[in-house]
Amino acid sequence: MDAIAIPPPEQLDSLDDEHFRQVVREFLRQNYPEHLRNPPHRLHWHECKEWYHRLAEKGWLCPGWPKEHGGLGLSPIKQIILTEEYERHGVARTPDHGIVMLGPLVIRYGTEEQKRRFLPKILSGEHIWCQGYSEPNAGSDLAALRTEAVLEGDHYVVNGQKIWTTLATDANWIFLLVRTDKQAKKQEGISFLLVDMTTPGITVRPIINLEMHDEFCEVFFDNVRVPKENLVGQPNRGWDMAKALLGFERIFIGAPRQSAYALSRLRLLAERVGVWEDEAFQDRYARLRLDLEDLKALYGVYVAKLRRGEALGPDVSMLKVIQTELFQRITDTMLEIAGENAGLMDPMEGNRDLNIGGLFIQARPATIYGGSNEIQRNILSKNVLGLPG
Amino acid sequence: MSAALDDGDRLESIRMIRDSAAAVVPPGGELRRVRELRWQEPGFDRGVLRQMGEMGWIGLRVPEAQGGAGLGLGELCALAEELGAGLVPEPLIPCALSAALLAAAGDAEHLPALLAGERVALTAWQERADTLEAPGAPDAPRRFLPMAAGAELFLLPVREGGRLALYAQPAAGADLATERTQDGGHYGTLRPDLGGASKLAEDVGAALEAALDEAALATAAYLLGGMERAFAMTLDYLKTRQQFGRIIGTFQALQHRAADLKMQIALTRASVEAAAAALDAGAAGDARRAAVSRAKARAAEAAMLVQRQCIQLHGGIGYTDQYDVGLYLRKAMVLANQYGSAALHRRRFMASAPEGEE
């Protein structure tokens, strides 16, 4: 078989789609560390930085960013192909808040100076970002957040607490929603601030989650001084930008990746426990597979909107709800067919990447984070359907 | 036995056994002991197991003439429910299963120490996942032995001709491997060694079938207790947590979901109690299988639904290890399929309860 040549990154968007798929496969075959395939939990920076740097070095780190900012500028369909191939290969998720969340926000709302200062450092892997939004009393009601930033001369002084901050122990920068005007309506006194995690006064405390993993953290701010040029956009306009970013988050969580992986595990498990040929199981599997195919189609619609430069409307909440609940139904089904294996803590003997209970537990918070599915349904009923209340 | 009691005495007997559970289930849902035992071997407290023996729980179903309490399934299910509410890790249900087999075998050598909670005997009947059949192949690895690292003795059903003989193999020196389970316990896989085993009985086929049914029903009751407790915690949370300037329990979507969970718990209780009453009234064969399968299918499905939703209704805090509601989900992940998954029990129900003949 002829080896597939991997063209330079700036040419990837001009390949035809099937050729592109082959290139991605070859790229992963050549570059992805074998021992990181299908990791049982979200990887820490020290575990996946080798891969992150490899992506950065090859120019493949930011598939969705425009080329002028160092991205691959891929078409929506190519981004989906890339995701599918990553998924098929069992590629681990890196600490990607800079790539998926902050980068697009800075590209859209940042000053030229902020773009020059922050984008290259995401591309080089020098800055690893985490997201400081939720607080103990501001979860679903995010706009109730109370962490405040008070302007004193050239600095904001930040005090308060964030929670559920993903991989904060690995990050060296955090983007924050902070209250800068306590008198205004709650959504109108919030600003968007970029903070160096090495600034004095920041304490990070990991939380052990149900995976028995320290993916989430609490982050405490005690008189943390942040240069005022680290504010993105206008003061007190942070909520609108964050909402736009939540749109990115929802489309990201709405990507079919988790469900597709889970479905591949369900099939493996069904074959292993001997129910694959079972007619009743085939019907259940077919239903899940059709749900996945249709989710992929709907996802493609939203990715296309983004690429055309259209703002995502509140209806993107559908994607988040559909994906996360499909992911859960697939892992529920795994538990139901696994017999006693459902209760095992570790992967099934003989299948290192068949961790039934682990995957089921990983699926639980998907309907909670990124705006709980209850909140997404509120958004759909009020802002999309126009129902009163 | 219990059929001889009138209803008032029966309810009193069940109430007493519930009250007695407080001896090992701390009031107020305190789970510190449970947390400390997680993923340790043997994963339970031998002192507590002896206490259970002293209270007559291990031999609850064993006839009085053989040193048991001679009580019914109504009592066993009430007890299992209380233990489930407290996530008690001692392997009472597997020990009671072994006690039933030893009693049926007429054994007087191993039974007393098992009933006293001094020695743990586990029945190594299972050769694959999700089954209630014991093929009894002499060399087949015996799987999914709960808390196997704490056993002193394994009981081995072995097929001999058309019969299922019972052997006893000491745990010391046995070829045993363990795998951790989500609830902090472990499953053992035993490679039997009949050379070092002694035969206790020629045929325990029918006794094993009955004992597995009782274990399945008690497991359903244990799941019910866990559901009730996790749901109570969740209701408390819905009544205190504020978002958007309101108690979240005032949101109708959440009220309806809580009402749906309550209905599943009520159906589970009705099904478990009906099955216990049917067995205590002497249901055997297909009638017993149908009653038990109905209860276990309901309990397994309802437990997974309720425990999943209890996490969801708590939001982020429900996904932390330090908050107790997650411990109930992990227990349900292990017990929902133990002694038969919901699908297995649905199939068995259809096979044992022909329509129109119930």
Image (cartoon, rainbow, N blue to C red):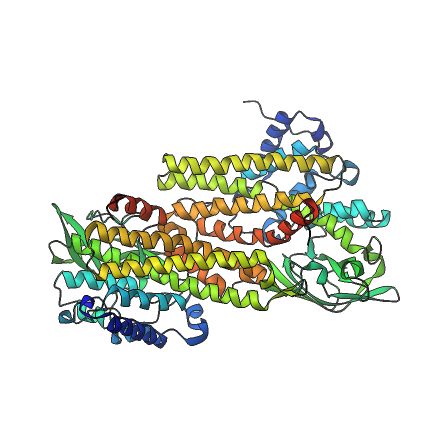
- Position of B187 relative to A157 (above/below): above
Task: Let me know if residue B346 appears in the view.
Answer: yes
- The answer to whether residue B236 is left or right of residue A370 is left
> Left or right: A268 with respect to A6?
left
- Residue A298 locus on image (x, y percent): 62, 36
* The quarter of the displayed image where residue B97 is located: bottom left
Q: On the rendered image, what quadrant is the N terminus of chain B found in?
A: bottom left
Toward the viewer: B61 or B142? B61
> Which residue corresponds to the image point at 56% horizontal and 64% vertical from the top-left?
B238
Given the current orientation, which residue lies at the most extreme right position? A153
Q: How many labels does the image show?
A: 0
Determine whether A336 is above or below A6 in the image.
Answer: below
Q: Nearer the viewer, residue B342 or B26?
A: B342
Report whether residue B174 is seen: no
Task: Report the residue at 64% width, 52% height from top.
Answer: A378
Where residue B15 appears, as percent x and y from the top left, is 31, 73
Residue B38, given in percent of the width and then of the height, sits at 42, 65
Residue ID at (35%, 51%): B297
Q: Position of residue B237 (x, y in %)?
A: 55, 66
Q: Residue furthest top?
A: A1
Q: In this view, does B53 lie above or below B165?
A: below
